Amino acid sequence: MNKHHRLALRVSVAINGVLSGAARSMMGVDLPKVAWDRCRHLTRQIQKTSRHGWHRAARQLQDQFRCALTDLRRQTDQVAGQLDAPDSSHATATPHDIYRDLITLHDEFDQVDICPRKHTISVVTGPIVLENIALGPFEVKLNWEELGQYQAYSVVALDPNPAVSSSDTTHPHVQDGSLCEGEGRVPIRHALRQGRLLDFFVMVRQILQTYNSSSAYVSLDEWQGIECHDCGRLVAADDRDTCELCEVDICNDCSTGCRACDRRCCGECIDSCSGCEEYFCSQCLGHCAGCQQPFCEECLTDEKCPACHEAENSENDFPEDETVPADTPVHTVRLGQTTVPA
Amino acid sequence: MRILLINNDGGGFADYLDVEEGTTVEKLFEQQIHSARSEDYLIRVNRQPVTADQVLREGDRVSFTPTKIEGAVFRL
């Protein structure tokens, strides 16, 4: 028996002792409290944004609320599944089981570290690549003294490539060193409760190797930023806007508000009025029936701009025998000037 | 004969199970994991990868772990 085996044996006995103590204090069923709290938190946020008239923020929160509800429903189903599962309380790992797990970890992971002083076991995954985005290897560190607690482990990126919009998000399902286990939550709880350390570490690795686009802190589509439709720059999700007419992504710098309806629009959906030169969206901007130039509602009278009206009035002022040659320009747009024959 | 079956799918559980002599890993998988493909699981017997036709023995520890486990979001 070499020193690694001796260490594994010593730690196995210690972990078995922790498990025996934890088993006495644990409840049989894990209620999805965190998922429920998140739903409550989001409903309060939605009410607040609606009260303030922040409709865009309210819409984004509703999307998050929908995901949170899906998560809550799945976790509730898993709790129901726990009740149907056979009683496995007798399956708590013996020191020998734990020892075999610790030894086998070396077959599954290139790097395994056991630190008796800090009561931790850590493994390092291979480099994680999801949808061609390299996220680097992750260290999964379990503190066996905290086996009975909710989050007894951390997941830390060793060569982090965080999302542009959130430096704390190193993986679509990892934030602040905490993994959101999703559908792995219940089996991971069971594995930890029963001292199946090998299963625990393998399941965490499999979660890290899987991407759930419907429930990610930051989706991989937006990981490296979002391309602005107008200027082509890559911007963080927080700095982006969406054109409320054509719904393309634009950066805050390229987003312009309509003076009349306050819609935020991209460059293609907004234009300046040829009269007052304020910006209006394509739905609020009309065209002069005479010169066809864009004008806002306030700058048009009877569907014509001031210059066209002036030109029309000048024509009416001419005596009947004084006609204007057909090729003479009747007005200059914007300047309100009209060329009148001497 | 008796084996320990660990199913890390869905609810996830570990329990002892009586199986017929001569039961292979593949047969046990079909019995326990309905409507799923074995390629989508890490299958271990006594913590080691095995072939589908391996015959189980008394006291074996068999685990089925999905290769893809979807994480999610929770943040307050």
Image (spheres, grey):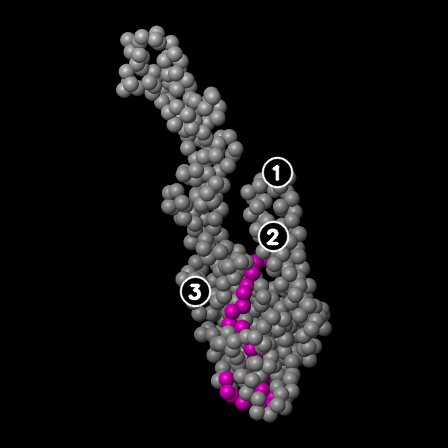
Q: CA distance from mark 1 to mark 3?
A: 41 Å
Q: Residue A52 — which label?
A: 1
Tell me where the magenta segment starts and ends, as one range. Answer: B52-76
Residue at mark 3? A129
The residue that label 2 is drawn on is A65
Q: Position of residue A135 (x, y in %)?
A: 44, 62
**What element does badge 2 sit on?**
helix
Which of marks 2 and 3 precedes in the sequence? 2
- Badge 2: how crowded within 10 Å, few (<14), some, or many (20+)? many
Q: Residue at x 29, y 18 (%)?
A: A326
Camera-nearest residue between A52 and A335: A335
**Real-space CA distance between mark 2 and mark 1, rounded to the nearest whole angstrom:** 19 Å
Name the residue at 45% across, 24% down: A303
User: Is residue B61 covered in magenta?
Assistant: yes
Query: Are the residues at dot 3 and dot 2 in contact (C-beta closer than 8 Å)?
Result: no
Q: Amino acid at mark 3?
A: Val
The residue furthest bottom is B21
Q: Do we see residue A88 in this rendering? A: yes
Residue A21 image-quadrant placement: bottom right
Say which amino acid is labelled 1.
His
- Give the mark nearer the N terminus: 2 vs 1: 1
Say what amino acid the circle numbered 2 marks: Phe
Question: What residue is at 63 percent from the left and 54 percent from the top?
Answer: A38
Depth check, mark 3 against mark 2: the one in front is: 2
Q: Main secondary structure of the magenta part?
A: loop
**Callout 3: helix, strand or loop?**
strand
Disc 3 to disc 2, C-alpha distance: 28 Å
Q: Is residue A259 above or below residue A17?
A: above
**At which x and y percent is residue A177?**
53, 60
